[in-house]
Image: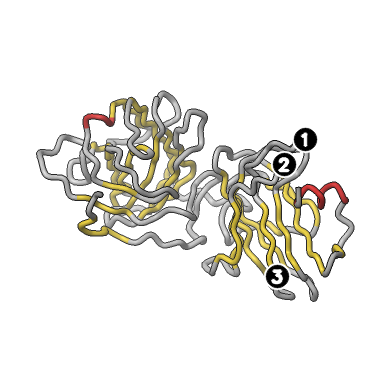
Amino acid sequence: MRKVLFVIAILSLAFGVAGAKDFQKYGCGELITFHNSGDRVGGDDMATATVIPGLPYSDIGNTSAFTNLYDVACPYTGSTAPEVVYSFEAVTDWTVDVTLCNASDFDTKLYISDSLGNVVGCIDDVCPGYQSELIGVSLAGGDTYFFFVDGYGTAAGNYSFDIDGTPGTVPPEPGETCETALVAIEGTNFAPFQTCYFTYTTSTEPGTLVISSCLPYQTVDTSLYVLDACEGTVVAESDDDNLGCGEAGTFNFASTVSFEALPLTTYVLFWDGYWSTAEFDFVVQEWVGSVANDDTSFGAVKAMFR
């Protein structure tokens, strides 16, 4: 087993960090460094990172010739794959898009840290073929950022690294951050993209609160975290509820949570896309005993418990 010699920095799980539709802010772990002796080649570690001279920038390579020195739980741990490191000096604020999806041929993982090792973004799979992409990551001016092209498990191979950006900080769209969260209602709600934030305020007698993307007419892979505040405690979460969603009842990658809710309480709903950034619908329902608090259609309610 690999021995962790030191931890560079701890990731802040703060939901207020500006992000984007598939910028996975929640579920990233800390940046961990492992000791491997031997000579370093360019791009092998943060000290020898390949410099990105300006944006846009593209590069290709193969991770197999490099060393396993870093890892981030994103959200999976235990990777022993080698990684390639790039660096970019952000003289001013930037909002960047980074993708490994154009020509990579292995199961990739992508994460970004600042010069102190604080993880500002990570993602595992977004594109078909198990490739990674981060869109709309904010970089503060006056720091150097490191981009890690890594693999899931032991995966390594050919990769394409493409980064582009816009100077300055792009204001987040409604729903992109916790501060700009959309307001969910009891009944059916529309999420314009993933990753997406909503808030929901319960009634005076909410009973059991059920939130679900398991609907008979859609097949969108989702993950859901419910928190008691933007930087608060997770009170419920769901990845694949495996209840048999979709028209054929065979789609098992939607998300459903149910818990005893507090009255007149605002909860944060954080929808985190796994395979997709696509729009989707979800249902919020309060149940007191066996009676729903609103007139949500029987079909939608039934779908939540299939």
Q: Secondary structure at mark 2?
A: loop
Q: Secondary structure at mark 1?
A: loop
The one nearer the camera, 256 or 284, is 256
Q: Which mark is residue 260?
A: 3
The one nearer the camera, 77 or 163, is 77
Q: Secondary structure at mark 3?
A: strand
Q: CA distance from mark 2 to mark 1?
A: 7 Å
Looking at the rendered structure, the kind of residue marked 3 is Glu
- From this view, report whether residue 296 is shown above or below residue 204: above
Q: CA distance from mark 2 to mark 3?
A: 24 Å
Q: What is the basis of the colouring in this image?
A: secondary structure
Give the residue at mark 2.
245
Image coordinates for residue 117, horizontal then vertical, percent: 29, 55
Image coordinates for residue 73, horizontal then vertical, percent: 39, 51
- From this view, report whether residue 171 is shown above or below residue 11: above
Q: Residues within 10 Å of mark 2 (few under 14, many from 20)?
A: many
- Can residue 288 be seen here? The reply is yes
Q: Residues within 10 Å of mark 1 (few under 14, many from 20)?
A: few
On the rendered structure, is 106 left or right of 196? left
Give the residue at mark 1.
247
Proximity of marks 2 and 1: CB atoms separated by less than 8 Å: no
Image coordinates for residue 42, horizontal then vertical, percent: 18, 35
Looking at the rendered structure, the kind of residue marked 1 is Glu
What residue lies at 27% left-to-right and 47% top-to-bottom?
A: 70
Q: CA distance from mark 1 to mark 3?
A: 29 Å
Q: Earlier in the sequence, mark 2 or mark 3?
A: 2
What residue lies at 76% left-to-right and 34% top-to-bottom?
A: 248
